[in-house]
């Protein structure tokens, strides 16, 4: 095993984590001298637990790590960069629904509240004055299952993300609430690693950030190459891949504001009642700053 071996966990297979998959498949990690194994764990809480237990080296979840820090006092990690500038979640409903108000008294399929999507959903419904007026169901774990149930008409609406939203729209389903509009100052996705990695493998972690920076640059600067990647890796149609590239690739970004992490903390406090902490306690953007200042 290479001394530079890293295990990176993603909480879902969706294209919301495309920069990591792209860097792995297109050789950008190898270009920067890293051996990275990207693994899939079932949900953000599983990724957070694995990171805090030292079972993986990096992950891309933010909300579950924040909630571990708030609830259990876990401080053995640091957010080292962003991944996306905007949330990718959306409440998607049947074609006959004209607005989120039409879901009053009906069912909405959701992730559980300890998952980021479920936490955001409860907060958004509270903001809209619909808390308790829409029934939340938790029948499906994965986005794929939730999308399939929605398309089959098993429920009125569901919380989807990324390409799953586009797939539903292709079938005539409607976006009732886009979370990037309802919560414009929250990003949900970030690169995080352990204090041990920052202490013992600082340069390698910086190289990891550099590789993700290169991946985002190619995704945005070489549209057709990224479209080809989406078609191959995610089995997307070229039309859908082109739509995703045009609409979503500009939203990937490494810079992250401490205020965005604080907003994540505030939302978890409002929804779950966990004690507030200061975002500065769990954020270290030193390596990101160094990477961003390097001459190309």
Image (tube, rainbow, N blue to C red):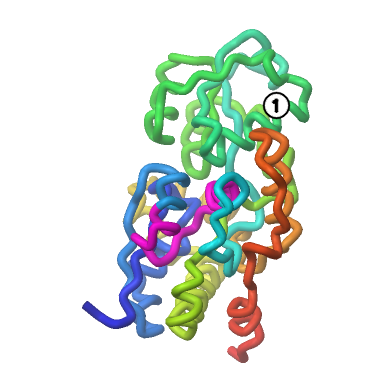
Question: Farthest left residue?
Answer: 1
Residue at (40% x, 66% y) in the render: 57
Viewer-proximal residue among 80 and 249: 80
262 left or right, relative to 134: right
> Is residue 172 at all visible to an observer of this figure?
no
Instruction: Bin the neighbour count of mark 1 within 10 Å (Cα to Cα): few under 14, some 14-19, many 20 and up.
Output: some
Q: Is residue 216 above or below residue 251?
A: below
Tell me which residue sits at (62%, 48%) in the image.
70
Q: Residue furthest front?
A: 73
* Farthest residue, direction top: 105
Q: Nearer the viewer, residue 43 or 56?
A: 56
Taking depth in this image into account, of 215 and 140 the one nearest to the observer is 140
Residue 140, horizontal then vertical, whole percent: 40, 26
Question: Does residue 247 appear to the left or right of 56 in the view shown?
Answer: right
Q: Residue furthest bottom?
A: 295
Residue 223, above or below 105: below
Asked where in the image residue 196 lies, by quadrant, the reply is bottom left
Q: Which residues are magenta?
A: 50-68
Compared across the picture, whether 126 is left or right of 211 comes to: right
Q: Quadrant of residue 246?
A: bottom right
User: What percent of the width, then of the height, locates residue 1?
Assistant: 21, 77
Residue 107 included in the magenta stretch of the image: no
Q: Position of residue 243 (x, y in %)?
A: 53, 49
Give the residue drawn at x 44%, y 29%.
Answer: 147
Classify 180 as above or below 73. Answer: above
Is 282 located above or below residue 293 in the figure?
above
| Residue occupying the point 47% across, 23% down | 138
* SS of the residue under disc 1: helix
Kindly identify which residue carries mark 1: 125
């Amino acid at each position: 095993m290479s001394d530079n071996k890293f295990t990176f966990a993603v909480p879902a297979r969706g294209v919301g984590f495309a920069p990591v998959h792209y860097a792995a498949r297109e050789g950008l990690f190898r270009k920067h001298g890293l051996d990275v194994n990207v693994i899939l764990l079932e949900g953000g809480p599983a990724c957070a637990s694995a990171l805090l237990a030292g079972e993986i080296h990096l992950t891309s979840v933010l909300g579950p790590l924040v909630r571990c820090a708030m609830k259990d006092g876990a401080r053995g990690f640091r957010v080292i960069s962003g991944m996306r500038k905007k949330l990718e979640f959306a409440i998607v409903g049947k074609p006959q629904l004209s607005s989120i108000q039409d879901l009053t008294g009906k069912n909405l399929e959701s992730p559980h509240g300890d998952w980021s999507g479920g936490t955001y959903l409860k907060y958004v419904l509270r903001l809209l004055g619909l808390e308790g007026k829409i029934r939340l169901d938790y029948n499906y774990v994965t986005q794929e299952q939730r999308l399939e149930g929605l398309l089959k008409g098993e429920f009125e609406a569901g919380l989807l993300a990324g390409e799953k939203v586009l797939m539903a729209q292709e079938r005539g389903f409607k976006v009732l609430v886009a979370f990037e509009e309802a919560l414009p100052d929250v990003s949900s996705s970030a690169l995080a690693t352990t204090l041990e990695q920052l202490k013992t493998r600082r340069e390698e972690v910086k190289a990891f950030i550099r590789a993700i920076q290169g991946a985002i640059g190619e995704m945005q600067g070489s549209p057709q190459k990224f479209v080809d990647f989406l078609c191959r890796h995610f089995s997307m149609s070229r039309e859908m891949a082109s739509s995703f590239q045009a609409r979503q690739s500009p939203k990937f970004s490494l810079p992250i504001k401490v205020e965005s992490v604080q907003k994540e903390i505030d939302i978890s406090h409002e929804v779950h009642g966990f004690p507030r902490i200061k975002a500065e306690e769990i954020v270290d953007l030193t390596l990101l700053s160094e990477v961003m200042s390097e001459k190309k």
